[in-house]
Image (tube, coloured by chain):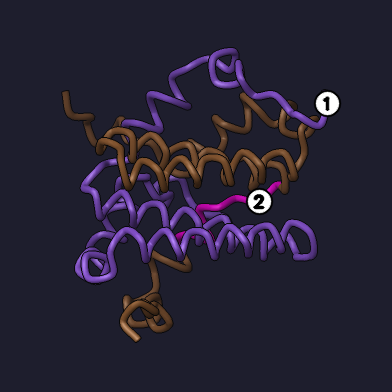
Chain colours: A purple, B brown
Amino acid sequence: MPLQEGDLVKIPQFQRTIAEKLVGKNKQMGAQFLMNVLVEEVGELSRALRKGTTDEVAEEVCDIIFAVTSIANLRGVDVEPFLKRKYIDRPLSEISREWTDVSWR
Amino acid sequence: MPLQEGDLVKIPQFQRTIAEKLVGKNKQMGAQFLMNVLVEEVGELSRALRKGTTDEVAEEVCDIIFAVTSIANLRGVDVEPFLKRKYIDRPLSEISREWTDVSWR
């Protein structure tokens, strides 16, 4: 069943929910631990892209978003204004100016 | 100036905006290129956590969210329902069951 517009999760709402559940635990674990988790998840995404299903790719993408959001929470930064300024409000030409595939060289 | 509640970006809205700007370009570049971008950004986040400012950490977190959202767009998956099911709707005890810091051993 497709989600209704009103049900859709806002980025700050996602970040706050993760913070409420995990900030204490993340403070115990620290940034290095979260970097380890992130790198592990990046490896899993790479594997899913080569061998996995679409759902497995989606799961790994979400695990990475979760890991980096936890890092943002640990440092006390809100990601939404940065995402908005850098990727929503800027034109494509600025975002992709340095977006060059080296395999084309 | 703090954002008003109505201005906050919803996760699907962010994903759709990125898709509108970049899906054609991403298809040209492909998943391996986007994985390269992701790994580069993970390295930059690691550096920012060691030596950077809070704003630099936030920038790198956003670049990673952008890279993995682009990968999701390339594979045609909506991340919001996966994020919601896996991290918003589940209790902490399930999320962190296997969340163990090896440096404690």
Residue most toward the left?
Answer: B1
Q: Amino acid at mark 1?
A: Trp
Mark 1 = which residue?
Answer: A104
Q: Quadrant of residue A89?
A: top left
Q: Is B31 on the left or on the right of A5, as rendered?
A: right
Instruction: Identify the secondary structure beneath mark 1.
Output: helix
The residue at 30%/41% (across/down) is B51
The residue at 27%/41% (across/down) is A78
Instruction: Identify the secondary structure beneath mark 2.
Output: loop
Q: Position of residue B103 (x, y in %)?
A: 35, 77
Residue A1 seen in this snapshot: no
- Work out whether disc 1 and disc 2 sit on a shared chain: no
CA neighbours of label 1 inside 10 A, class few (<14), some (14 to 19), many (20+) = few
Location of residue A31 with respect to B9 vertically, above or below: below
* Residue nearest the viewer, comparing B1 with A28: A28
Q: Is residue B25 magenta?
A: no
Mark 2 = which residue?
Answer: B77
Q: Chain of mark 1?
A: A
Mostly what secondary structure, the magenta segment?
Answer: helix
Q: Which residues are magenta?
A: B76-84
